[in-house]
Image (spheres, rainbow, N blue to C red):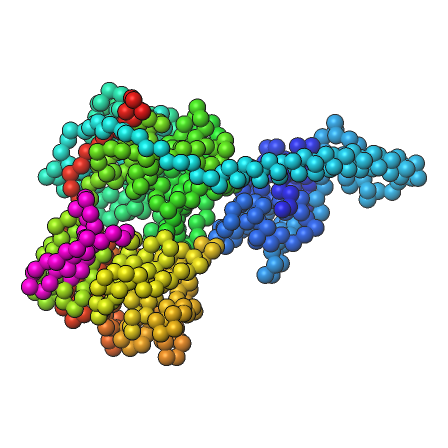
């Protein structure tokens, strides 16, 4: 690791026409003075300090960004901005040199000037270039020997200390790898809302006094913003005609709520004071259909999760926006094979940002500063971390896993999970927000997963599930899916004549598919893909890939196609598991998130940019296709012979590749309710029917969970 910062003894650095003031982070050429952004100052300092070396992109990632991965475009933009800043009427020449396919180097010879109180041998760095007499040489040699002696002593001391620290750190690391035992506690559930409707997307103010929620009132077509004071119970509604309003964040002083307004595909960000007489203020336009979590830092800047990074509509990145100039500084650099970064919390006394990086199969918790430097990965969880609160007294982060119903406390002092509490309460919750160790806000789960059957010819649309259901498959014209009635999980078969057969199962998969001949099935869990005998659901074979699964599907001849995310998280790998020899074959297609097999011996891939690619198994040739309709659910595709059905979440499109690969989509179905989301689609073997897994809204409540006193 190379040095990246000037020591405090450096007063000024001169190069070319410029003079750099490290303390003020400014440059001056005698006529123009410019204040450098923190990232540009850090890059410039790094190049000067390491001027005798070629600085690679990996050097910049490791020592300047301090991250495992930084997008190439982020580095390109930063270097371009630095070159612009270093040009003036006085300084026109080259300052930073690019070495083709190698990196960068500082082109000029810098002169470092130190404060006078520093030892004279360190003050006159450039005096080595001047002629000196013998007496001066002896004096310099003597001072050098003395300084070397001091450095050697310090080095020996630091080596011994570092050895002790390594032993201590090894011990601490062993402690950190031990996950604390789960403690089970009972929590009482208190209803805080009495309005009839659906509550969603809540964000708690930094001082924990007010909650902002999106609320769909019964018989209303659009959502309103509901601001509820948790101490007094007072509520304030903010609405707009023919528009949906959602919470988006808070000001750092908790005096103003930030919200987004969506109408006719247009999105705007606003803020409003908490008093009944306070008016709203427009901030800027935003990306439609995607949630925003933001903090207004009261210094004319706002940190928020911005969608549309690298032209991917669903990929978010953290940015710091100047509200006066509309200039935005990119804080984070998520990899393309993720869903990006979501702002969670700003710790004021530390000046640190807490954010979540949503991977395909995990949720990663990070901490960084406002410039995106000193980024630290704190924790990795298999479920989403939707919201975070900070407890100053214990210097801890608090969050609630609403899937496993576990309340986490993460110690920033010890850098580890300090406690895990299994919460026993009355309901399940779609969203939660911790207030402190003993209290959690929750929204009772307002969604239900239902299976519908849609006849493409007659347009008949009917619900076939009675309880919360998922993973619908066709076996011929019969329909198979899993359901849960709150007590047990059942495998259901709906026959063509409408009769239903159900049996209890004891497995829990995050995806479940049945082969077309109904002789086997496979389920995906943490261990891999389990291939089952469908008749008795016993495990026949297991696929254990090296990395995390993204998607899997049956191909022809009951081969299984699957995609995993590689170790770096920057790319995906696609495989065919050959059933004849039980070996996985790596395919030369990159960045895929789903693929299936057409009847004409071609594989069709969907990549992370919503582009289709075709791979001919006979010739090995790849053909670039076209961009499909954007979707929030990347695996919502199904193949029947040479037709592909694709869900955008709101509609189903048919792509018929029977004659060509460059064809226009045909809309075959559209959800009747705006709030419904189609998260899965499947086609029958005859191609006459589709199954749709639809998430629907039902009324819910805002509640507060409080630890029982006897606990």
Seen in the image, is 593 located left or right of residue 66? left
- Residue at screen point 55% across, 49% down: 61
Task: Confirm whether the magenta stretch covers residue 506.
Answer: yes
Name which quarter of the figure residue 441 lies in.
top left
Across and down, in percent, residue 384 comes to: 34, 44
Compared with residue 479, is residue 508 higher up or lower down, i.e. above or below? above
Q: Quadrant of residue 249?
A: top left
State the residue lying farthest toward the right.
134
Q: Could you tell me which residue is drawn at 71 percent across and 47 percent down?
A: 109
In percent of width and height, residue 565 lies at 41, 57
For the record, the magenta segment spans 479-508
Q: Residue at x 65, y 50 (%)?
A: 106
Of 406 and 132, nearer the camera is 406
Q: Kindly identify the residue that appears in the image at 69 percent across and 40 percent down.
A: 14
**Would residue 660 be visible to someone looking at this image?**
no
Q: Position of residue 486 (x, y in %)?
A: 19, 44
Q: Residue 581's spot in the image, x, y percent?
A: 38, 73
Secondary structure mainly formed by the magenta segment: strand
Instruction: Report whether residue 104 is seen.
Output: yes
């Amino acid at each position: 690791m190379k040095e990246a910062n000037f020591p405090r003894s450096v007063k000024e650095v001169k190069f070319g026409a410029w003079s750099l003031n490290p303390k003020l982070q400014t440059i001056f050429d005698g006529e123009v003075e410019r204040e450098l952004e923190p990232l540009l100052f850090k890059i410039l300092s790094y190049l000067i300090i390491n001027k005798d070396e070629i600085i690679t992109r990996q050097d910049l990632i490791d020592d300047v960004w301090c991250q495992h991965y930084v997008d190439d475009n982020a580095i390109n933009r930063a270097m371009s901005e630095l070159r612009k800043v270093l040009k003036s009427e006085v300084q026109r020449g080259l300052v930073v040199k690019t070495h083709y396919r190698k990196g960068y180097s500082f082109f000029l010879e810098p002169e470092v000037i130190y404060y006078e109180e520093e030892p004279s041998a360190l003050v006159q760095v450039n005096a080595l270039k001047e002629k000196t007499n013998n007496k001066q040489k002896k004096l310099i040699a003597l001072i050098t020997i003395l300084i070397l002696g001091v450095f050697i002593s310090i080095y020996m001391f630091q080596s011994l200390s570092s050895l002790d620290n390594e032993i201590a750190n090894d011990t601490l690391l062993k402690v950190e790898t031990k996950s604390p035992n789960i403690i089970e506690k009972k929590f009482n559930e208190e209803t805080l809302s009495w309005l009839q409707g659906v509550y969603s997307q809540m964000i708690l103010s930094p001082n924990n006094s007010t909650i902002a929620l999106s609320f769909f009132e019964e018989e209303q077509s659009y959502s309103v913003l509901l601001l509820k004071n948790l101490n007094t119970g007072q509520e304030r509604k903010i609405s707009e005609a023919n528009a949906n309003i959602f919470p988006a964040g808070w000001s750092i002083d908790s005096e103003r709520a930030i919200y987004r307004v969506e109408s006719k595909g247009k999105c705007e960000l606003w803020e409003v004071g908490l008093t009944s007489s306070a008016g709203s203020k427009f901030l800027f336009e935003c990306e439609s259909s995607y949630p925003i979590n933001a903090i207004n830092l009261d210094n004319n800047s706002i940190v928020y999760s911005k969608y549309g990074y690298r032209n991917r509509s669903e990929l978010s990145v953290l940015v710091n926006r100047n509200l006066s100039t509309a200039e935005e500084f990119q804080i984070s650099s998520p990899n393309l094979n993720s869903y990006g970064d979501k702002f969670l919390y700003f710790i004021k006394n530390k000046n640190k940002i807490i954010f979540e990086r949503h991977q395909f199969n995990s949720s990663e918790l990070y901490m960084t500063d406002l410039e995106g430097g000193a980024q630290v990965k704190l924790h990795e969880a298999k479920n989403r971390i939707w919201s975070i609160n900070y407890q100053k007294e214990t210097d801890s982060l608090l969050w609630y896993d609403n899937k496993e119903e576990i309340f986490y406390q993460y110690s920033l002092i010890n850098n580890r999970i300090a406690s895990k509490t299994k919460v026993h309460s009355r309901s399940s919750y779609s969203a939660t927000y911790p207030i402190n160790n003993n209290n959690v806000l929750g929204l009772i789960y307002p969604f239900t997963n239902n299976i519908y059957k849609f006849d493409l010819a007659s347009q008949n649309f009917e619900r076939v599930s009675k309880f919360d259901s998922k993973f619908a498959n066709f076996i011929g014209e019969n329909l198979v899916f899993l359901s849960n009635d709150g007590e047990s999980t059942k495998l259901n078969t709906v026959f063509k004549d409408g009769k239903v057969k159900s049996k209890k199962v004891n497995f829990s998969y995050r995806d479940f598919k049945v082969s077309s001949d109904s002789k086997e099935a496979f389920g995906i869990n943490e261990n891999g893909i389990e291939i089952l005998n469908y008749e008795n659901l016993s495990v026949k074979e297991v696929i254990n890939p090296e990395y995390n699964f993204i998607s899997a599907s049956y191909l022809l001849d009951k081969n299984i196609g699957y995609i995993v995310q590689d170790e770096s998280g920057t790319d995906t790998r696609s495989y065919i598991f050959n059933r004849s020899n039980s070996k996985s074959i790596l395919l030369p297609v990159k960045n895929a998130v789903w693929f299936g097999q057409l009847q004409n011996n071609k594989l069709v891939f969907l990549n992370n940019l919503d582009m289709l690619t075709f791979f001919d198994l006979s010739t090995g040739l790849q053909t670039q296709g076209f961009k499909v309709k954007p979707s929030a659910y990347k695996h919502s595709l199904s193949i029947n012979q040479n037709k592909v059905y694709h869900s955008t979440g709101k509609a189903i499109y048919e792509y018929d590749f029977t004659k060509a690969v460059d064809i226009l989509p045909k809309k075959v179905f559209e959800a009747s309710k705006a709030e419904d989301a189609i998260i899965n689609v499947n086609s029958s073997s005859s191609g006459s029917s589709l199954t749709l897994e639809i998430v629907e809204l039902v009324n819910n409540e805002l509640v507060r969970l409080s630890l029982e006193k006897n606990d």
